[in-house]
Amino acid sequence: MRRKILLTPGPPAGKGYGDDRTGTAMNAEERKKHILRCAKKLFSRHGFYETQISDIITEADIARGTVYQYFKHKEDIFTTLLEEFYTAWERLIASASENVDLDAVSPEAYLRTRIRTTLLFFAGDNEMCNIVLRMGVGIHKSFDAVIKRFEKKIAGVIIDDLVIGQNYKTVRADIDRELFANIIVGALFRVSYYYFVQHKSHKDSRDIDAITDRIVGFISPGLFAK
Amino acid sequence: MRRKILLTPGPPAGKGYGDDRTGTAMNAEERKKHILRCAKKLFSRHGFYETQISDIITEADIARGTVYQYFKHKEDIFTTLLEEFYTAWERLIASASENVDLDAVSPEAYLRTRIRTTLLFFAGDNEMCNIVLRMGVGIHKSFDAVIKRFEKKIAGVIIDDLVIGQNYKTVRADIDRELFANIIVGALFRVSYYYFVQHKSHKDSRDIDAITDRIVGFISPGLFAK
Amino acid sequence: MRRKILLTPGPPAGKGYGDDRTGTAMNAEERKKHILRCAKKLFSRHGFYETQISDIITEADIARGTVYQYFKHKEDIFTTLLEEFYTAWERLIASASENVDLDAVSPEAYLRTRIRTTLLFFAGDNEMCNIVLRMGVGIHKSFDAVIKRFEKKIAGVIIDDLVIGQNYKTVRADIDRELFANIIVGALFRVSYYYFVQHKSHKDSRDIDAITDRIVGFISPGLFAK
Amino acid sequence: MRRKILLTPGPPAGKGYGDDRTGTAMNAEERKKHILRCAKKLFSRHGFYETQISDIITEADIARGTVYQYFKHKEDIFTTLLEEFYTAWERLIASASENVDLDAVSPEAYLRTRIRTTLLFFAGDNEMCNIVLRMGVGIHKSFDAVIKRFEKKIAGVIIDDLVIGQNYKTVRADIDRELFANIIVGALFRVSYYYFVQHKSHKDSRDIDAITDRIVGFISPGLFAK
DNA sequence: GATGAATGAGTCTTCATTCAT
DNA sequence: CATGAATGAAGACTCATTCAT
């Protein structure tokens, strides 16, 4: 029986009539944002797959059907979140570019601004930061341990190298080892992904040698003591 | 009944005899590896959640129950894959370290070896490379488009900056822009993730300024023309 | 949590292991037939939409998932039922035609065979009969009353006419009024549907006059007393 | 606020003012009819279950809640449609009976009027015709193909028989085969439904033989050449 | 009277896991 | 050990109905 006609028709009832936990009424715009906010929180903590619509409506304190008044499906929520984030980023970059007089600013100052802008942007929303940059989170709790171990290890190896280098006085003493290790890991992971997964046009060891050379050439000046 | 002795000699029936494309029978060890190989292929392409046990047994041409003879659950397969990968990496790093005489080798040559080793390792198994380096992202087909767009854009912005810098002669002419953009993106993403998600100890804008300064200080020497 | 890993894994349990209410094990073929049989019963009584998968599995005493091992979806069950029925009918007609020597049999005897065969076929499976011929059933309980009233009325009108005609001696005295009313109603409904819904090529009143004439011409000889 | 007095005078806001394509305001009576008209169109095309309240309000260009001001539930709309149709039919039949002087009119002329009236009635509203005469079948798009095939086939068989009969000169040459096939199919379906589903009082093959005989006796005079 | 956001019971379908053979 | 039919908890999504405005 699809619907118990004449028996239990009933819908609404009780709370939720537009209220939030604050009891303030919400218009469509606000409510959509509210759902998005709650979903972001959950996606950030548990990932897309481990976040259920049930979790979202509990968090948002709304009815099941309400979600579907604002979003076509679960993916739509996630996609909207991504789109908004990316759009904000694009706007930021665009506005940042506008206000720069390339002739008046030193290259280093320019680079500095760029990097600072990006970091500030990510720092401003660490939930989206987690969603977008997630490196292992949001997959499945049971993988966390394994992943964490690896991430720790790989950074550790680099740090050890740096310590040795600093002892040998070959590596600059003022290097922030922790930060540096992350830079290297990030760079290597991304380069690997880019060349070996996305553009895997028969990279043989000679290609890899070439790539290695360029990376070393780029890193060395900032890394080693003169 | 046991009548058709000549027809169904060994185990149950029909195909699925545990053989692989070769038709050769497999022992336990081989069979487990076979399953892992098939699962890896699928996880790499569709991610953990979008890969079903059904897909794995189809790919491996085995019976549903067989999987559970070798793995406790689906997660166990994935975890085993990760573990194996990490273990291999650790072994590689360890053996690489053993054979180095730090007094006999230049710091740059040492760095070169380290990087080359890592790249070779990733290049050697681009399925695992995809799984490990993208994991959270190999999520759902419908997100791919959005993500790709962003990734393209962010790299594009950096490349544009480099072009400008090279025109102005402030950036070294021999920089491989594509590679460099990936290094920067990778570094920034990871650093952001590390500081703003994992260790989010109240990073205010002063912390970010400090981090920015260090990154700039590290990158500049290799980036700018003298 | 998609699946409460390590917490509540469990499936099977208890009954249902292939048993029916008879306790006899079933092979794939039988089980599919069993599901079909149960579904037919329910579809026949409550219609496609008012029959839930839950009802079917209760009736068949199987698990929810089992249905989907044999049928892609609910529609698939219904369609299979229709297909089987139609196929059986086609086979029947074909075999009936084979054994007829048109030169040796009187036209009336031939007609007789045809009609008898069809009636026997429908009489043989009144559940499918109801599903296929349903004229108002299987829609929604709440419509039943309205429909029944109309059906009664329309037949009533015809029967009244016949009574009058028989009193006037213009209608053959040996007419089975109930049967005849159904023949007329069925014929008129179908003709209307055929000409006014399916092939609605601008039937104006002249067309209708022509159709009427033909119907009258065909019915009259068997209806009126000489 | 009530500022835009000149813009939003009457009720709430925007469109949906209750008007139809003419832009004229509607009173309660008209509005109810309007909803019925729209619902009829949709029920006719997609059936009761595949027509949603959402579809109806879109078609009628009214608000969701408005429907429930005129109808208790979805079923109520459908039932109203049926009731109206049946009532109209009853009125028609009643008025047709009034004006007949049975002593002055030939039985055949009387039959002719009856049939013509019925056909005209159905032809006058092919949406209701579709709803009433197909009801159970306007079920689900996916079944259409299967059903159509059967309907075609069954009519085809009869037509083939007629062709043969006409070649043998046993069947009247002036028979409209298409029309006749529909008459027979309609009659047989309805009789089957009546006797085997509704009044299934142990119809055994002897009953069926009796029914068959009567049908043949009734059809033959109009069918066969003398 | 009209509106339409909110409601939530109900329904289909998926899929990891088990266990008799 | 391999098999694969059976299992059923879980989850996404629908949609008739209500009621504050």
Image (cartoon, coloured by chain):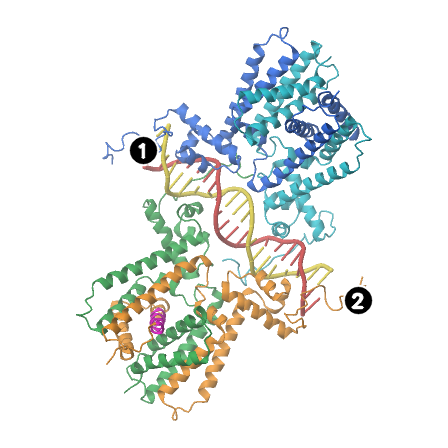
Chain colours: A cyan, B blue, C green, D orange, E red, F yellow
Q: Disc 2 sits on a residue from what chain?
A: D
Residue with the mark numbered 2: D5
> Disc 2 residue type?
Ile
Most extreme residue toward the right, as rendered?
A104
Quadrant containing the C terminus of chain D in the rendered view: bottom left
- For the stretch drawn in magenta, what is the main secondary structure? helix
Which is closer to the viewer, label 1 or label 2?
2
Q: Which residues are magenta?
A: D178-191
Residue lying at 46% horizontally and 54% vertically, measured from the top left: C52
Q: Disc 1 sits on a residue from what chain?
A: B
Q: Residues within 10 Å of mark 1 (few under 14, many from 20)?
A: few
What is the quadrant of residue A210 in the picture?
Answer: top right
Question: Residue A148: percent from the left, percent from the top?
Answer: 61, 25
Residue with the mark numbered 1: B12
What is the quadrant of residue D100 in the picture?
Answer: bottom left
Q: Secondary structure at mark 2?
A: loop
Q: Residues within 10 Å of mark 2 (few under 14, many from 20)?
A: few
